[in-house]
Image (tube, rainbow, N blue to C red):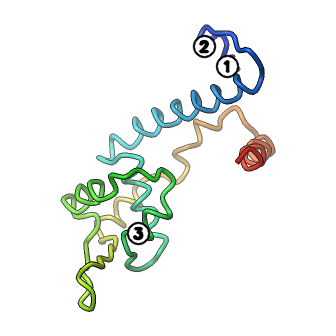
């Protein structure tokens, strides 16, 4: 089992500081795992998140709705969508009533790509946790926020 103090060769003034640094360190560790996994699919984790949202919606969504549903609410959503459009994984549908409104829909190519990605791709991240551990962790993180 990992020990943050040994991994980053540091001591902490108290357990709150250690917990915060551990959360940040673990978040970066998870991000690195996901970046490496999605590389073989030609995606970033943020692009996958957009495709996941659109697949689940079952129809076109406004860009703002996608931004609100994203896990990582980065300001570069338009750039991410540009790349997905260039790969023909999503399509922009301009509104006929209001030219300021653009809806986004996942294409068949996007659905096919999503179908090829294993749903348990995060399993290695949780290999040392039981389902009860995962529930406890989730509850503690909810409590923290």
Q: Is residue 136 left or right of residue 27?
A: right
**10 Å crowding of disc 2: few (<14), some (14-19), many (20+):** few
Q: Position of residue 59 (x, y in %)?
A: 41, 80
List the single residue furthest toward the left: 86
| Distance CA(mark 1)–CA(mark 3) | 39 Å
| Distance CA(mark 2)–CA(mark 3) | 40 Å
**In the rendered image, which residue does mark 1 sit on?**
2
Of residues 90 and 142, the one nearer the viewer is 142
Q: Quadrant of residue 10?
A: top right
Q: Indicate the secondary structure of the residue bearing disc 1.
A: loop
| Distance CA(mark 1)–CA(mark 2) | 7 Å
Q: Which mark is residue 64?
A: 3
**In the rendered image, which residue does mark 2 sit on?**
7
- N-term-proximal mark, 1 vs 2: 1
Whether residues under marks 1 and 2 lie with C-beta atoms below 8 angstroms apart, the answer is yes
For the N terminus, give its image quadrant.
top right
Q: Residue at image x 55%, y 43%?
A: 122
- N-term-proximal mark, 2 vs 3: 2
**10 Å crowding of disc 1: few (<14), some (14-19), many (20+):** few
Of residues 10 and 105, the one nearer the viewer is 10
Q: Position of residue 81 (x, y in %)?
A: 29, 60
- N-term-proximal mark, 1 vs 3: 1
């Amino acid at each position: 089992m990992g020990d943050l103090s040994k991994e980053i060769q540091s001591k902490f003034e108290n357990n709150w500081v250690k917990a915060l640094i551990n959360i940040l360190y673990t978040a970066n560790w998870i991000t690195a795992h996901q970046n490496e996994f999605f590389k073989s699919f030609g995606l970033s984790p943020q692009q996958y998140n957009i495709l996941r949202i659109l697949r689940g919606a079952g129809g076109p969504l406004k860009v703002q709705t996608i931004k609100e549903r994203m896990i990582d609410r980065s300001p570069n959503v338009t750039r991410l969508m540009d790349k997905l459009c260039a790969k023909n994984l999503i399509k922009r549908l301009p509104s006929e009533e209001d030219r300021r409104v653009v809806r986004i829909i996942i294409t068949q190519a996007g659905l096919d790509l999503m179908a090829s990605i294993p749903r348990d791709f995060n399993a290695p991240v949780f290999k040392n946790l039981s389902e009860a551990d995962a529930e406890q962790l989730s509850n503690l993180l909810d409590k923290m926020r």
